[in-house]
Image (cartoon, rainbow, N blue to C red):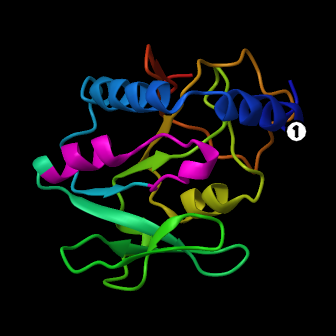
Amino acid sequence: MLKKELRLNYSILRENTAREALLNSSLSIANQLLKIPIWNATYYHIFLPIFDKKEIDTSFVLSILQGKDKHVVLPKVMNSSQLKHYLLTDNTKLLTSAWGVPEPEDGIEITANILDVVFVPLLAFDKKGNRVGYGKGFYDRFLKECKPDVLKVGLSLFEAESLISDSNSEDVRLDFCVTPEKIYSFKDS
């Protein structure tokens, strides 16, 4: 299926997801994450959800990271194509952007090349590790700035599509994708 069709289909599926189901699925995803070998790293990049778009509630994952005393890094959109990244500290003040994204106001800037694990938002993904986001390319550009061995972990409410037919060389593939029911690994594919 084409990215455009997937964006539309999965946006509708998300929109029709009940809040309680979203919360339960988010908790299941966090529990599934504990089963993959990503917990020996130091710097973890995580997105905070746009609740109006019924994105996965990453607060459960954030609790795991804080409980394991990891360095947590949050993104902030700086212009129409760039993300900056800030260390989450006790003093971090979050503001909601025009897009409804909770972002750090400012703080200790972290460069992408020191990140070990990136939790990647998405609308849909396929069995080869390709993903579909909102179509702005923020994460594809950002992931190309990361070190080659950064672990890219997608978080999805829904299971994999067979194939995203218009994926291309500019798209950055995931290493893992975690759903409420399953863990997909793409490291050897």
Q: With 170 as the anchor, is 31 left or right in this view?
A: left
Q: Nearer the viewer, residue 12 or 139?
A: 12
In the rendered image of this protein, does residue 80 appear above or below residue 53? below
> Which residue lies at the image location 65% right of the left edge and 66% below the top edge?
99
Q: Could you tell me residue 20's position as x and y percent?
A: 44, 28
Magenta region: 47-66
Crowd class of label 1 (few under 14; some 14 to 19; many from 20; radius 10 Å): few
Q: Is residue 17 above or below residue 71?
A: above
125 is higher (above) or lower (below) than 138: above
Q: Quadrant of the N terminus?
A: top right
Mark 1: secondary structure: helix
**In the visual, does 5 lie left or right of 61?**
right
Q: Quadrant of residue 80?
A: bottom right
Image quarter for residue 86? bottom left
Q: Quadrant of residue 16?
A: top right
Residue 173's spot in the image, x, y percent? 61, 39
Residue that numbered label 1 is attached to: 4
* Residue in view at x 54 percent, y 65 percent: 145
